[in-house]
Amino acid sequence: MKFCACVISHALARNQSHDDLVLFGANIVLGKFSAFLSENRSYGYVILDHIPVKQPFVYLKEKFQTGLTFPDSPPIRLDRSLEFSQASDGTCHLCSVADVMLGSFRYCVNEPDNEEAGKAMFPALRSMMWDRERNGKKDVSDCGLVLRPTNVQEAKHKAEYDALTQRLQ
């Protein structure tokens, strides 16, 4: 099992609607899953837990039929994903495992003052994160740990991302 999480600063996300943030994050993770499948010459299934947006099945149908869409470029087909579905609450062990992993990850990211708990939880999460070999080391950046936006200009926000990355290492 491999794990991938997208992180965006609350301060940078505050002006976005709930649906836009959920779908933005889902699109990031779907794109990374597609890259993972391609890199591993494999195929997979997308089973999302409850998607808290107005029309989740319209979203899933678009991802299956069209892929990832962008305002200024052609869509990217998610052709290695064989199915896009949403599980009902309490009906999928894999979704329950993902909930625990994501909740633990969220705690490690959002609770920097409780370093002891983070140090106890994060190594197990880190071992399941998708990584690549870079400079002789396993690196999760832009694989299992996806920070958005990719290019943070404002110093205080850049410092926040740098502190998070340092803490997770």
Image: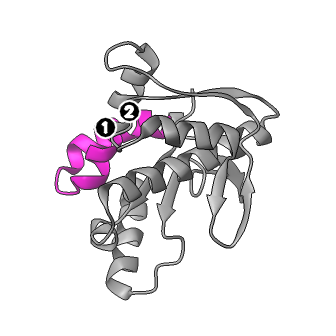
Decide whether residue 117 is among the magenta residues: yes
Q: Is residue 31 above or below residue 87?
A: below
Label 2: which secondary element: helix
Residue nearest the viewer, comparing 120 with 97: 97
Residue 148 tag number: none
Label 1: which secondary element: helix
Write the start and end of the magenta stretch as one range.
104-127
Where residue 39 appears, x then y in whole percent? 78, 42
Where residue 93 appears, x then y in whole percent? 42, 14
- Is the image coloured rainbow, by chain, by secondary structure, or in one colour? one colour
In this figure, which residue is indicated by the disc labeled 1?
104
Mark 1 Cα shell of 10 Å, populated few (<14), some (14-19), many (≥20): some
Decide whether residue 108 is among the magenta residues: yes
Where residue 20 appears, x then y in whole percent? 40, 58
- Residue depicted at x 57% and y 33%: 2
- Residue depicted at x 72% and y 68%: 73
